[in-house]
Image: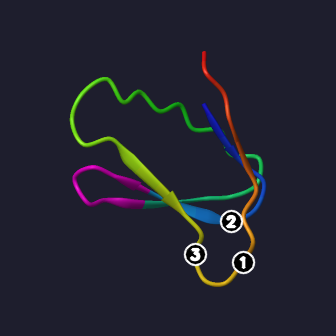
C-alpha cells in the first residue's frame, strides 16, 4: 500500500501517470511486468509511506 502525504505522481509500467493527493490510499500489486514509479510533481517535497501487506 502507498499513502502519500503531499500531492505527487505515480507512473504505471505502460506509461500511464496518475496524481494522488494527501489521504489517498493506493494498493499496488507488482506481481509481474515492469512495475511502477513514484515521483514528485513540480518542486514540492513529497512524503509517503509504503506498507507491505
Q: Residue drawn 72% across and 77% down?
A: 44
Question: Furthest-top residue in view?
Answer: 53
Query: Where residue 6 sits: x, y (%)?
Result: 75, 62
Vertical placement of residue 46 versus 43, above or below: above
Q: Residue drawn 24% across and 27% down?
A: 32
Q: Please tell me which residue lies in front, 21 or 5.
A: 5
Of labels 3 and 2, earlier in sequence is 2
Secondary element at image label 2: loop
- Is disc 1 surrounded by few (<14), some (14 to 19) or many (20+) residues within 10 Å? few
Part of the protein shown in magenta:
11-17
Q: Which mark is residue 44?
A: 1
> CA–CA distance between discs 3 and 2?
7 Å
Query: Where residue 5 sits: x, y (%)?
Result: 78, 54
> CA–CA distance between discs 2 and 1?
8 Å
Q: Please tell me which residue lies in front, 21 or 40.
A: 40
Vertical placement of residue 9 versus 42, above or below: above
Secondary element at image label 3: loop
Secondary element at image label 1: loop
Q: Are marks 1 and 3 in contact (CB under 8 Å)?
A: yes
Q: Is the N terminus in the top left, top right, bottom left or bottom right quadrant?
A: top right
Q: Are marks 2 and 1 in contact (CB under 8 Å)?
A: yes
Q: Which mark is residue 7?
A: 2
> CA–CA distance between discs 1 and 3?
7 Å
Q: Does the magenta portion include 6? A: no
The answer to whether residue 34 is left or right of residue 26 is: left
- Is disc 2 surrounded by few (<14), some (14 to 19) or many (20+) residues within 10 Å? many
Q: Please tell me which residue lies in front, 52 or 16.
A: 52
Query: Where residue 22 sits: x, y (%)?
Result: 76, 55
Q: Are marks 3 and 2 in contact (CB under 8 Å)?
A: yes
Q: Which mark is residue 41?
A: 3
Vertical placement of residue 31 versus 21, above or below: above
Q: Residue drawn 77% across and 47% down?
A: 23
Amino acid at each position: 500500500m502507498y499513502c502519500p502525504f503531499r500531492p505527487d505522481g505515480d507512473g504505471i509500467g505502460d506509461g500511464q501517470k496518475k496524481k494522488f493527493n494527501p489521504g489517498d490510499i493506493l494498493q499496488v500489486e507488482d506481481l509481474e511486468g515492469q512495475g511502477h514509479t513514484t515521483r514528485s510533481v513540480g518542486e514540492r517535497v513529497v512524503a509517503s509511506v509504503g506498507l507491505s501487506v
